[in-house]
Image (cartoon, coloured by chain):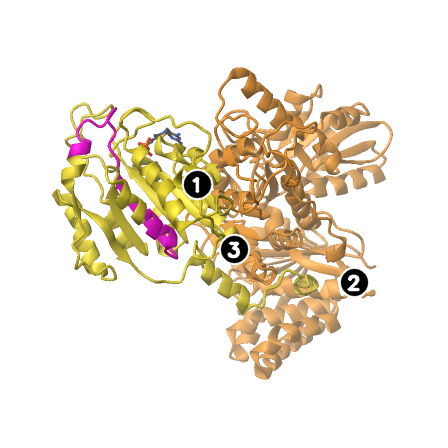
Chain colours: A orange, B yellow
């Protein structure tokens, strides 16, 4: 029997080649026409520590990292210890034995494949080929397409010289032979290759970087922070090619300030950070609201508060993203579901900032940051770029002149007669300070009023399912992918369940929420934070009384957790 | 491309006045500095549409409102990084940053080293009145300990900093000092800063008759001493020695230091050239790097 959808988990110590092994498998599967969704955890330590890379692959679309693994490949004793409780009957277990640093107990029903990875590497006089031995064994045992895998290895190692390549291939073939000698004893098997699709395989962070370049940014200011730093790395490589500038600022206050300055000067500009950086940016985001200056901040959320859990996943910055500034400070907040969203919603977020002349915060999270996924390759010609409204140079220019949609044209510095002030002080139509109560109120109405049409500018929400349901699940961010699968599996079991997936978090598309809730008996809101932050907003803004379901262990939900909860509240 | 390249005009100083009326106290030194800015802009011939005046918050930070130019009135302490972003986005324009000692060296102090060492092409005029004016008289990083103020009723517990010494050691490429009571000296130094390609820092003593009762106009007049005629402005060591005198009751007035160093935008431009950057770069080349 062939199972089309399977999850391979590789675990070991950081630096042992866990990550590259996972990358090779993911790329080989993608080249063989499969969908791929990977998930990894890094050690918090600079060197060493437990590292895990999980590849889920299938011919069907994938939305999350899966319930658990079907195949475990353990490079060392710690990897076994961390994962042994998940070795259930039917799981295939590939491990370094003999001569590894551990001797596992094999639970009943678990199919064991001891492969002497360390010993083989040692015999070849190269510890670093251990992961190649494992890769060969995995390929042979689970039908990971050898042809595409070898192509990937050639591409990877060819720059390092022919000797390096042949050495790695030799280790790979040794692994294959060792596995073949053990014989196939389990049911797990990657589907046979189909014609490859026009896809990229890219991480969430790189995808944000790609979206930024496609979205036309010409200025990016960075300050390093886990798990967002790779976005800056990607942009730094490519932005000079389009004649743009990336600068590393002295802190996040400076980076958002630089973005505001560059945007005032007429350039599409952004930064990316994580919660601690977004906290520091609060005051300047208010300045952007007040001065109606387009800025984009991508927040790749991590465990908080304080320094929190830098390398761990959490969806706990929704309060901060929506309300993190003093005064009544309007902004637009969007949240991505998956790596595909990371590309096209970054473009969209830039368009929103430019069109509405306000701060836009795009929320990603730690589970997407490093998750590589197959996504349709974007077509530059099909990317829609919305420019800010610019003054046409006629008549007297008043920067904050009232207009029917609340949007007033901007003038790029250098434009004759367009001189104006961008100010954080409350101001009248021409920008001069004005602290009169009626003016303050009128200006608030302008700044908030212009956001009324955001709900039509983007696709604010998605509904998964039709008709009446017993349970409706509202999910945001990367939890959506988990819920999509849970909904499909529950439905297959005959349970009436629907999903509702907001991408626009603020302004909240209240009518969409309420219309959805009207078709469901109960509303469940699973999210990865302690307080139930979206549930809180739903209770505050709508007439819905959701059942909040929260976890905050630093890892995403699994479909089975959601399914169990739905069954419990039915 | 500092002001050497920007579009020029023959406007008079008064043409740089905006129609927003100035709101400072009578006798405030900031008036003298503002007039010097008008003169410097006129003498340098900067077209108002080619200039962005940028400030943070404080009495002095109100200045951009009074200047006929593009302008940003931002947040307390953040004028510097905002200006850095604007400069990198539009290196073809002139950038003028205006603010106080609290704005620049207290809340914004973390940004100063980086603008200086990165040699961001802008002119930073710091109105040094040794006090927080706008919040009505608290001690600032340049207040003398003798000063009794709002939060120092028994005198100050701290030593003041020396802005010139800081900026010289941080790597500013144009460092000068003047006094608001000498507007023509101020104007000349500001003009020099505008014409200098790189980070220009001009510290200008400015009396605050409302809140700083010890640093009076007379005090500053006695404090300042023209930079010796034979001072070599390319000699960093000599400039540092002069700057140190400010802490010893004799403050140099004039240009202390001037150096030629690539600016941040020039280095950024070199990067663009290094990768053959072009506005119509084929983005498919970037996309293709991410195929499996
Ligand atoms: C974040 C923040 N903290 C405090 C203030 C209050 N504040 C406004 S101006 C100022 C100090 C002004 O002193 P200085 O920069 O020396 O300029 P001056 O008014 O003396 O010209 C302070 C503390 C503020 N606006 N923002």
Q: Position of residue A43 (x, y in %)?
A: 50, 54
Q: Is residue A537 magenta?
A: no
What is the number of the mark on residue A33? 2
The percent coordinates of residue A86 (x first, y second) are 63, 49
Q: Residue at x 83, y 65 (%)?
A: A195
Q: Quadrant of the C terminus of chain A?
A: top right
Q: In this image, B200 relative to A376: left or right?
A: left
Tell me if mark 1 has few (under 14), some (14-19) or many (20+) residues whose alpha carbon lies within 10 angstroms of its own: many
Residue B196 shown in magenta? yes
Which residues, given as a range, are shown in magenta? B190-218
Q: Secondary structure at mark 2?
A: loop
Cα distance, mark 1 to mark 2?
55 Å
- Separation of disc 3 and disc 1 at Cα? 21 Å
Q: State the residue at coordinates (82%, 59%).
A: A2
Name the residue carrying label 1.
B54
Within 10 Å of the Cα at label 3, are there few (<14), some (14-19), or many (20+) other Cα atoms? many
Q: Is residue A457 above or below residue A218?
A: above
Q: Quadrant of the N terminus of chain A?
A: bottom right
* Callout in the foreground (3, 1): 1
Residue A121 vs A238, above or below: the answer is: below
Q: Which residue is mark 3?
A: A246
Relative to the observer, which residue lies in front, B5 or A562?
Answer: B5
**Does residue A568 show up?**
yes
Q: Is residue A197 left or right of residue A351?
A: right
- Which one is closest to the eye, mark 1 or mark 2? 1
């Amino acid at each position: 029997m062939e199972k089309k959808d399977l999850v391979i988990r590789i675990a070991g110590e950081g630096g042992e080649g866990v990550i590259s092994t996972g990358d090779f498998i993911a790329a080989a599967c993608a080249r063989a026409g499969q969908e791929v969704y990977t998930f990894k955890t890094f050690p918090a330590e600079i060197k060493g520590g437990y590292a895990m890379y999980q590849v889920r692959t299938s011919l069907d679309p994938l939305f999350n990292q899966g319930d658990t693994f079907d195949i475990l490949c353990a490079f060392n004793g710690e990897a076994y210890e961390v994962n042994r409780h998940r070795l259930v009957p039917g799981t295939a277990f590939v491990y370094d034995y003999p001569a590894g640093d551990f001797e596992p107990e094999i639970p009943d029903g678990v199919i064991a494949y001891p492969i002497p990875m360390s010993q083989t590497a040692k015999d070849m006089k190269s510890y670093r080929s251990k992961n190649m031995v494992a890769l060969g064994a995995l390929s042979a045992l689970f039908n990971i397409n050898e042809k595409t895998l070898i192509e990937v290895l050639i591409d990877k190692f060819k720059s390092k010289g022919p000797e390096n390549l042949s050495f790695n291939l030799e280790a790979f073939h040794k692994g294959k032979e060792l596995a073949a000698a053990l014989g196939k004893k389990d049911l797990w098997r990657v589907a046979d290759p189909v014609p490859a699709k026009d896809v990229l395989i890219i991480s969430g962070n790189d995808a944000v970087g790609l979206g930024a370049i496609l979205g036309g940014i010409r200025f990016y200011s960075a300050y390093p922070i886990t798990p967002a730093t790779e976005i800056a790395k990607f942009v730094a490589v490519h932005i000079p090619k389009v004649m743009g500038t990336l600068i590393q600022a002295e802190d996040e206050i400076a980076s958002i300030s630089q973005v505001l300055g560059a945007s005032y000067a007429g350039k599409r500009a952004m930064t990316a950070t994580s919660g601690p950086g977004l906290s520091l940016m609060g005051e300047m985001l208010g300045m952007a609201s007040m001065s109606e200056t387009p800025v984009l901040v991508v927040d790749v959320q991590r465990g908080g508060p304080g320094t929190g859990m830098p390398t761990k996943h959490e969806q706990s910055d929704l309060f901060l993203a929506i309300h993190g500034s003093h005064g009544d400070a309007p902004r637009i907040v969007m949240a991505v579901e998956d790596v595909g969203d990371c590309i096209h919603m970054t473009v969209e977020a830039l368009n929103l900032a430019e069109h509405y002349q306000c701060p836009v915060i795009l929320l990603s999270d730690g589970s997407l940051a490093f998750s590589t996924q197959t996504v349709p390759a974007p077509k530059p010609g099909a990317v829609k770029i919305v420019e800010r409204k610019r003054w046409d140079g006629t008549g007297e220019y008043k920067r904050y002149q009232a207009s029917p949609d609340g949007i007033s044209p901007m003038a790029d510095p250098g434009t004759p007669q367009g001189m104006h002030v961008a100010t954080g002080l409350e101001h009248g139509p021409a920008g001069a300070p004005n602290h009169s109560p009626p003016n303050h109120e009128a200006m608030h109405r302008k700044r908030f009023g212009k956001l009324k049409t955001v709900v039509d500018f983007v696709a604010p929400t998605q509904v998964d399912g039709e008709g009446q349901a017993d349970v409706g699940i509202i999910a945001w961010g990367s939890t959506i992918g988990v819920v999509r699968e849970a909904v499909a599996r529950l439905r297959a079991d005959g349970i009436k369940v629907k999903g509702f997936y907001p991408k626009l978090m603020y302004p909240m598309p209240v009518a969409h929420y309420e219309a959805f809730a009207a078709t469901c008996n109960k509303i469940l809101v699973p999210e990865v934070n302690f307080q139930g932050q979206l549930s809180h907003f739903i209770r505050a803004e709508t007439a819905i009384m959701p059942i909040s379901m929260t976890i905050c262990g630093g890892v995403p939900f699994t479909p089975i957790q959601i399914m169990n909860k739905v069954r419990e509240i039915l | 491309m500092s002001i050497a390249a920007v579009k020029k005009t023959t406007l008079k100083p008064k043409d740089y006045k905006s129609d927003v009326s100035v709101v400072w106290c009578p006798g405030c030194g900031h008036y003298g500095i503002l007039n010097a800015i008008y003169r410097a802009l006129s003498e340098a011939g900067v077209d108002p549409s080619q200039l962005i005046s940028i400030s943070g918050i404080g009495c002095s930070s109100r200045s951009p409102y009074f200047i006929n130019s593009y302008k940003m009135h931002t947040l307390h302490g953040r004028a510097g990084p905002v200006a850095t972003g604007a400069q990198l986005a539009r290196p073809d324009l002139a950038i003028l940053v205006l603010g106080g000692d609290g704005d620049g060296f207290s809340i914004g102090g973390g940004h100063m080293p980086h603008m200086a060492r990165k040699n961001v092409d802008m002119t930073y005029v710091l109105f040094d009145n040794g006090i927080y004016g706008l919040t009505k008289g608290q001690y600032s990083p340049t207040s003398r300990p003798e000063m009794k103020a709002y939060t120092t009723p028994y005198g100050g517990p701290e030593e003041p900093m020396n802005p010139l010494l800081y900026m010289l050691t941080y790597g500013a490429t144009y460092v000068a000092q003047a006094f608001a009571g000498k507007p023509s000296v101020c104007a000349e130094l500001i003009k020099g800063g505008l014409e200098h390609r790189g980070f220009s820092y001009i510290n200008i003593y400015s009396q605050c008759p409302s809140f700083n009762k010890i640093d009076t106009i007379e005090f500053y007049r006695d404090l300042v001493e023209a930079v010796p005629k034979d001072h070599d402005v390319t000699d960093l060591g000599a400039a540092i020695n002069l700057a140190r005198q400010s802490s010893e009751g004799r403050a140099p007035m004039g240009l202390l230091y001037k150096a030629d160093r690539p600016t941040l935008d020039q280095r950024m431009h070199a990067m663009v050239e290094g990768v053959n950057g072009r506005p119509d770069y084929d983005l498919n080349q970037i996309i293709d790097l991410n195929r499996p």
